[in-house]
Amino acid sequence: MKTVKDVMSNHPISVRKTASFKEIAARLREFGVSAFPVVDEGGMVLGLVSEADLLLKETMDGGYDGVRGMLSGALHRTELHKAAGLTAEDLMTSPAVTISPDDPVEHAARVMYIRGFKRLPVTDEFRRLIGIISRTDVLAAFDRPDTDIRLEVVQHAIPLVAEPSQFQVAVKNGIVTLTGAADTAAIAHELVAKVRQVQGVVAVRDRIVYPLPQVPASPGPYF
């Protein structure tokens, strides 16, 4: 199973907590990203500062009294404080959502989807920044030849559960089709679960047959 460290960027771009609004805006534009991790002097991730954070400040400081009043009524106190900030430490969202280099890529994808993030800071056990994983990096895990996927399914996934000679495996565009006969329904279901974990698998089509559980006969009438 591919992990975050296999696909992440090892040269993350970040800003210090003392970085000014102008410096953050310039770096966002320079590197063409929408957010940066904010770190302290030791490289520990403190939060995340984004285009949205800068836009909030610009909106509140723009001198539009009507807009200011309308927004002030709707914004949370924390956002109002952030809008008044001058440095990355003031503007950032904290604590930052981070991920471990040893987490599965699928976990990173799930966090990004649920939280609506485009990228996640990767940190070590001390929360020090060691990388960045983006949506593009996550999708790269599916860029794997069908022949490689099939080989791993046959040589590694199936033997964990059953005898490989009992099954036939076909892979096209990352979609694995499993046919054959399993001894029990439990084995068939476990096999499908193992194959889904193989890197690059987009979906699994289960065509495995197995014996249905025997239903005990109802007792006859008593006389």
Image (cartoon, helix red, strand yellow):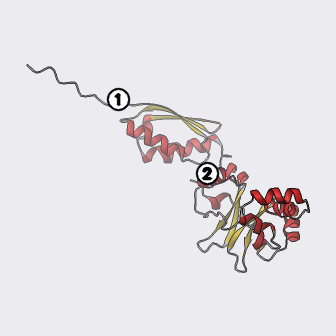
Tell me if I can see residue 21 in this picture.
Answer: yes
SS class of the residue under badge 2? helix
Tell me if I can see residue 13 in this picture.
Answer: no
**Quick check: marks 2 and 1 in contact, CB under 8 Å?**
no
| In the depicted structure, whether residue 45 falls above or below residue 152 | below
x and y percent of residue 101 in the render?
61, 64
Is disc 2 surrounded by few (<14), some (14 to 19) or many (20+) residues within 10 Å? few
Q: Amino acid at mark 2?
A: Arg
| 48 or 177: nearer the viewer | 48
x 88%, y 63%: residue: 30
| Snapshot quadrant of residue 20 | bottom right
Q: Amino acid at mark 1?
A: Leu
x 80%, y 71%: residue: 85
Residue projecting furthest to the left: 223
Question: Mark 1 sits on what residue?
Answer: 212
Number of the label disc, if any, that sits on residue 45: none
| 87 or 154: nearer the viewer | 87
x and y percent of residue 157 in the render?
49, 46
| Snapshot quadrant of residue 126 | bottom right
| Snapshot quadrant of residue 87 | bottom right
The answer for how far apart the CA atoms under marks 2 and 1 are is 35 Å
| In the depicted structure, whether residue 114 falls above or below residue 59 | above
- Residue mark closest to the camera, 2 vs 1: 2
Residue projecting furthest to the right: 63
Question: Mark 2 sits on what residue?
Answer: 110
Q: Say whether disc 2 or disc 1 marks the residue closer to the N-terminus.
A: 2
Whether residue 214 sits left or right of residue 41 in the image: it is left
